[in-house]
Structure formats: structure tokens, C-alpha cells
Image (spheres, helix red, strand yellow):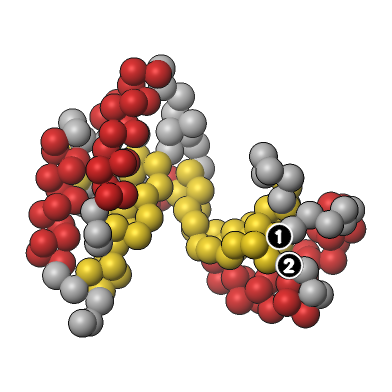
Amino acid sequence: SNYEEITYEGHAPHGIAVLVETATDNSTRTVANVRMHFTKCGGSLGTSGSVAFGFTRLGEFKVKNTGQNLEDLELDLIDYGLEEIGEDSEGNIVIRTAFNEFGNMAKALDEKKIEVITAELTRIPTTTMELDEEAANDVLKLVDKLEQDEDVQKVFHNMG
């Protein structure tokens, strides 16, 4: 089949911004399903551009931490588009780069023999909203429904 990538934007309950990346061979079915999930969970599907401005598209690499000095690694990778470097909760090194520098960073990590665990394009919210547990569960219910849809590839939101 011929698949088309479409991004949908909307609001979950409690004003949380949501971006839904899909790949579909039937956009009519996909938009109907995405709209249904938003509606059933108390949210609303928005128009193109309604929430995308609140997210930054970045390349994100998780690499094996073999005891590298983060400052040295930062200096080593800055010329390849490095924007952020840090550690995740599992001790892996997380490297973020501008969307258009993704290929440069992938090549640099390969040339420097740095073991990449994951490499993906992601969307990071520019601001986040904190919700209490009950409200957060309302949002997570929508996110879960969307993620279970066969056409949905990724779901991003700005809940902190």
C-alpha cells in the first residue's frame, strides 16, 4: 500500500496540547478514528498549527554510557549540531540535536564508534502543564487510546 504520514493536533482534557503522528493508507479512516478518540475522552481535534507551535522537533539519540566525560563529549559533538546533552534515569547519555542536524549527528556518532541505543525524531514541548493525578489520568486515557490505534506512530503532549 501507499502510506501517507499525517500529523493531527488537538487538545486533551484540561487543556493539554497533543500531537499525533500517523502513517496511513486511508486518511479518511484515520482522521475519523483520531477525532473519535479525542471526542470520547473529552478532548477536541484542532486545526493544523493549533498546537504544533508549542513543540520543538529534535533528533534524540540515547547512547551507551561507558564513563565518558559529558563535558568532553559535548565539546566533541558541538560541531555536529549538538543542542543538549544529559543522562536519562537509566544512566544512558541523551543527546539532542536540531531536526535538520539528525543525519550529521548520526554520522558523527558512528565515526566516533559511540554505541547508539536508540535514534529517533521527537517533539519536545516548549512549556509543560502540571495536573493533579485525576486530571492526568484523563489525559493518559486519551494518549493510551491513541497509541492503540494501528495508524498512530507516536503521540506527544505537554503534560509535565
Q: Circle 1 is placed at which residue position?
A: 63
Residue contact at pointers 2 and 1, CB within 8 angstroms: yes
Query: Circle 2 sits on which residue?
Result: 115
The kind of residue on which mark 2 rests is Glu
Looking at this view, is 160 or 81 the one in front? 160
Q: Position of residue 22 (x, y in %)?
A: 29, 62
Q: Is residue 138 above or below residue 21?
A: above
User: Element type at marker 2?
Assistant: loop
Q: Is residue 24 left or right of residue 114?
A: left
The answer to whether residue 54 is left or right of residue 113 is: left
As drawn, is 33 to the left or to the right of 106? left
Residue type beneath disc 1: Val
* Quadrant of the image occupied by residue 28: bottom left
Q: Is residue 120 positioned above or below 85 on the image?
A: below
Residue at position x 36%, y 50% in the image: 155
**Residue 105 on image: x %, y %:** 68, 71
Count neighbours of disc 1 (C-alpha within 10 A) and say few if under 14, some if 14 to 19, many if 20 or more: some
